[in-house]
Amino acid sequence: MTSPTKGITSTNIERNEWQWGFTPQAELWNGRFAMLGFMAALLTEWLSGEGILHFYGLMHYMSVATR
């Protein structure tokens, strides 16, 4: 008979602890910051009525005749 806890190892690493380098914790924080940035871009587009690149003046509008 095998134990139901066989193969489960415990670690002392906190999942949300900030660590530098390519670690699972860093990837969690990268994902969280990416989600915040994406939501900020959507909110900017919604409030201003134009795309994020147009809002910051990085992209100019093209008229229908020049397409």
Image (tube, helix red, strand yellow):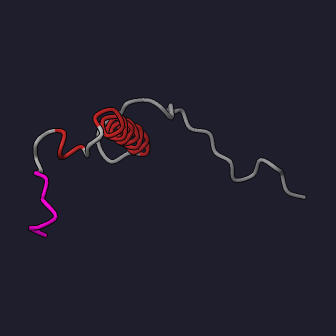
Q: Residue at x 18, y 46 (%)?
A: 53
Quarter of the rendering containing residue 56: top left
Left or right of residue 50: residue 17: right
- State whether residue 46 is above or below residue 7: above
Q: Is 48 included in the stretch rendered in magenta?
A: no
Residue at image coords 47%, 31%: 16
Location of residue 67 in the rendering, given as x and y in whole percent from the top left corner: 13, 70
- Identify the residue at horizontal 56%, vertical 38% (top origin): 11
Work out whether 7 lies above or below 34. Answer: below
Near-viewer residue (63 or 12): 63
Residue toward you, 3 or 26: 26
Using residue 23 as the reference point, say whether residue 59 is left or right of it. Answer: left
Where does residue 21 sit, x and y in percent of width and height?
A: 29, 43
Above or below residue 64? Residue 29 is above
Q: Which residues are magenta?
A: 60-67
x and y percentages locating residue 45 in the rendered image: 31, 40
Q: Which residue is at the front of the view, 66 or 41? A: 66
Residue closer to the observer: 5 or 18: 18
User: Which is the main secondary structure of the residues drawn in magenta?
Assistant: loop
